[in-house]
Image (cartoon, rainbow, N blue to C red):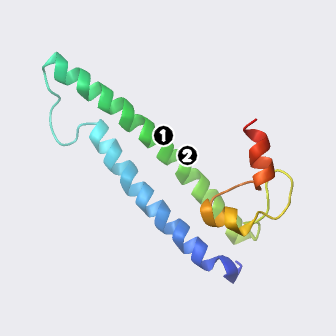
Amino acid sequence: MSTNYDDVRHNLISMLEELDERLTTITQDIRHADGDLEKDSEEQAILNENNEVQDYLGNSAIVEIAAIKQAIARIDSGDYNVCQECGAVINPERLKAVPYSLNCIKCASSKTK
């Protein structure tokens, strides 16, 4: 592992732990671990809407967790700053902004078009 990315790796692991905690909380909230569901249909509708939002947040966390794990693996293999699309070096400022970036800005931009 490159010592240049030890701090980044540590920060990614911290992000991963925080996301794991958040995902656990979301999962418990969706399962209503804190109590029974309300019987009132209006309350039930609000709970269903809240569950949809939490489900979206949970899915987003799962995607981010996978990206962070991939970034840690790339640090460990020495490929962290290499664009997965074109093989160019990813700008350090991009990695600083989004430490789990897979692609250089050029390739990332071409995917959104």
Residue 18 x %, y %: 41, 60
Mark 2 Cα shell of 10 Å, populated few (<14), some (14-19), many (≥20): few
Quarter of the image where one finds residue 69 = bottom right
Q: Is residue 61 above or below residue 91?
A: above
- Which residue is located at x 49 percent, y 61 percent? 16
Residue 83 x %, y %: 79, 57
Q: Quadrant of the C terminus?
A: top right
Q: Which residue is mark 1?
A: 59
Looking at the rendered structure, the kind of residue marked 2 is Val
Q: Which residue is mark 2?
A: 63
Spatial CA distance of label 2 from label 1 is 6 Å
- Which residue is located at x 58 percent, y 78 percent? 7
From this viewpoint, which residue is outermost toward the bottom?
3
- Which residue is located at x 68 percent, y 83 percent? 3
Residue 73 in sight in this render:
no
Is disc 1 placed on a helix, strand or loop?
Answer: helix
Q: Quadrant of the N terminus?
A: bottom right
Residue 12 in sight in this render:
yes
- Asked whether the beta carbons under mark 2 and mark 1 sit within 8 Å of each other, the answer is yes
Circle number at residue 94:
none
Looking at the rendered structure, the kind of residue marked 1 is Asn
